[in-house]
Amino acid sequence: MSERQILKGCVALAEGAIAAGYRFYFGYPITPQNDIPEYLSARLPQVGGVFIQAESEVASINMLLGAAAAGARAMTSSSGPGISLMQEGLSYMAGSELPGLVVNITRIGPGLGGIAASQGDYRQATRGGGHGDYHLIVLAPNSVQEMYDLTIKAFYLADKYRNPAMILADAILGQMKEPIFLNPPPLVLPEKPWALTGARGKKAQLIKSLYLADGEMEQHNWHLYEKYRRLEREEVLVETDLQEKMDVLLVSFGSCSRMVQSALDLARSRGIRVGFLRPISLYPFPQQAVREVSREVGKVLVVEMNTGQMWDDVRLSLYPGCRARLLARPGGGIPAPGQILAEIENLVKAGDGIDESVHQA
Amino acid sequence: MYYDVILSGFGGQGVLLMGDILAQAAMLENRQVTWMPSYGVEMRGGAASCTVVISSKKIGSPLAEEPCGLIAMSKPSLLKFQDKIKSGGLLIVNTSFVEPEMITREDLKKICLPASEISYREVGDYKMANAVLLGAFVSFSRVVTLRRVEEALDVFFREEKQKLLPLMLKALQRGSRYVLEMDGGS
């Protein structure tokens, strides 16, 4: 095991990508993810990689598509507005079944918004974002260690399912430094017989997302559907910290879950029985885990840095009769552990049958 | 064990590096630690700050609602953060840039030292004020040992920066001595 070292989240992510055997970066600058290309522009040449600052995000995503079609592990990174520009390419990649990693170190939206931490891109990330019937594989780290570990994981999932993957993080996770272990798993690059590596001595192949024959596209959509159902069965990542006879279950993801962790410690020190469930894979969402845990507890508090996006997924997953409340801070606001604790205490006092309501922290 | 501190000043005074060194020292003591910079349109001469959280347990929030300690190297940083400090907490002020009269809190442990002047006169370079303050901070708070901070410097002062190492060490020790020579704190 390597020694602990202190790294910034964006740098840990870049090192994770290198540990996953990735050697191609295409991107266009935008705050707050610039630490990634800044670091990789120096680091990638050291490992024989290619760093290209593209002329735009549209170019970046199409370079990613091209590298993926040639069988390479490739990545781009951006933030809110840049990710929006990439949606057409992401839809084409999903339709063409091309793997690749897109990192979204989010900004506040809508529009140009701001650079502070926000979780307002949850819906865009988990619902597809571009046109058509598809999903990205979306992983949400909550520590610098996970910025490293989940980036490696995302590359493997993307290849395994031939589907683009996304790391969804924000300025807190990108800028924060923490001690981490850099323990790269053994590098296993999967065979990609479908990749376009030249037709000399073999049959020419075609990668496309356009299917015009009768019923062909319907069949293709069902094929993608099966893939997403398999992801939902086999690749859910969730962290839970539960107790017997819980008063309240907290649900939160990403940087926000760190504030919730502090509130959980405070609540437990006051004798409140609190459980915690953190979706790590936002797509596939841990529906089953939420359902099972919420069966044990009548009240759920969702805490998010938006006006309620994961909240939809939680409410779709709740055990019938279990009620949820949302504590929300959009627009760069960060819910303080004290605010979360106050809401937990309100919920405990409220008795059964709380209203399903949105509370501004 | 849990301690959170905000280190603040003008961009260019080395407050982020001061936090980096503290975090490195905490890691060497096998603590959990987070370092979080303020993040906005920061620039040289503008406001800069970071929050370091050190704990024996897993750390939740890397931000400090009510920090145990504040190091303020400039007037704006004192004015911005002094009201947040936990009652009974620690305030360290660089009086080379801040008049002690600007401190409005009565319920804190306070260390007022002219770190930039000490750095200039006794270390030979005014830019080591951050290390003077860090030396004072760790010797008073004992959140990590001075020895660990000295060890931690190695990571930051390598190759062409190595020539600064003796100055940093001297500045740290000078800050530490300032605290040890105080009349049991103020």
Image (cartoon, grey):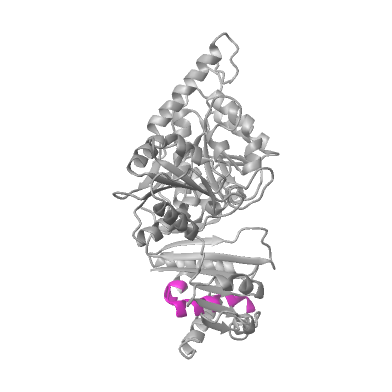
Residue B160 visible: no
User: What is the count of numbered marks?
Assistant: 0
Q: Position of residue A255 (x, y in %)?
A: 50, 51
Q: Residue B77 vs residue B52: left or right?
A: right
Q: Where is residue A315 in the image (x, y as percent from the top left)?
A: 46, 37
Q: Is residue A252 above or below residue A97?
A: below
Q: In this view, does B118 lie above or below A261?
A: below
Q: Does the magenta stretch include residue B133?
A: yes
Q: Where is residue A183 in the image (x, y as percent from the top left)?
A: 40, 49
Q: Position of residue A209 (x, y in %)?
A: 58, 20
Q: Is residue B144 magenta?
A: yes
How would you classify the magenta stretch by its main secondary structure?
helix
Seen as rendered, the residue at the extreme left is A244
Q: Is residue B7 above or below residue B185?
A: above
At 58% from the left and 15% from the top, the residue drawn is A211
Task: Give the residues drawn in magenta, as a range.
Answer: B126-149
Residue B12 or residue A271, whichever sits in front:
A271
Seen as rendered, the residue at the extreme bottom is B183
Residue B137 or residue B87, whichever sits in front:
B87
Q: Residue A188 vs residue A332: left or right?
A: left
Q: Residue A336 vs residue B12: left or right?
A: left
Q: Residue A275 vs residue B82: left or right?
A: left
Residue A50 or residue A249, whichever sits in front:
A249
Residue A286 visible: yes
At 53% from the left and 77% from the top, the residue drawn is B91
At 44% from the left and 51% from the top, the residue drawn is A145
Q: Quadrant of residue A133?
A: top right
Seen as rendered, the residue at the extreme top is A214
Quadrant of the image containing the N terminus of chain B: bottom left
